[in-house]
Image (cartoon, rainbow, N blue to C red):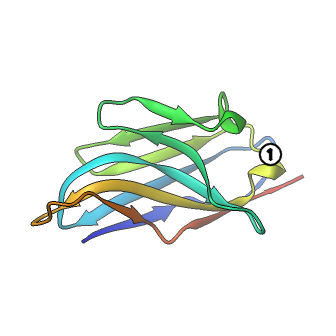
Amino acid sequence: QVQLVESGGGLVQAGGSLRLSCAASGSIFRLNAMGWYRQAPGNQRELVATMNVGGSTNYADSVKGRFTISRDNAKNMVFLQMNSLKPEDTAVYYCFTNGLALGSTRLTDYWGQGTQVTVSS
């Protein structure tokens, strides 16, 4: 199995910045895409940003130009630098990866427990 642990959430004023980190551990054979989703109260979980092993990225339109995703493949980590935060960015942010565990032949989606990001106006 693969475990994901997020860190870096918190409370920040509008216009501020936060950096989220996520570390994958466990019986990892290969991690493909890694990224971040978020879920605000009453809303469905939505994609924020993803990055594949080769470095190609995909961002939600609402965060383009403000958020930057990066990853350290050697350490099985993914990061999300969030700048110019807005109150509408308030949500629980979930780390995500799609990968293969040791001994498995099936690609599986794995999720972290989530970290709260609150942006005050």
At horizontal 29% and vertical 51% (from top left) the residue drawn is 76
Please tell me how crowded label 1 is: few (under 14), some (14-19), or many (20+) other residues with Cα within 10 Å. many
Residue projecting furthest to the front: 106
Q: How many marks?
A: 1
Q: Nearer the viewer, residue 41 or 105?
A: 105
Q: Quadrant of the N terminus?
A: bottom left
Q: Nearer the viewer, residue 52 or 72?
A: 52
Where is residue 87 drawn, in percent x and y? 83, 51
At horizontal 22% and vertical 44% (from top left) the residue drawn is 74
Q: Give the answer, above or below, for where 18 lies relative to 63.
A: below
- Which amino acid is tagged 1? Lys
Q: Give the answer, above or below, for where 109 lies relative to 48.
A: below
At horizontal 68% and vertical 33% (from top left) the residue drawn is 61
Query: Is residue 10 in view from this perspective?
Result: no
At horizontal 9% and vertical 66% (from top left) the residue drawn is 103
Where is residue 13 drawn, in percent x and y? 81, 51
Where is residue 40 drawn, in percent x and y? 73, 62
Q: Secondary structure at mark 1?
A: loop
- Residue beneath label 1, please? 86
Where is residue 24 drawn, in percent x and y? 32, 60
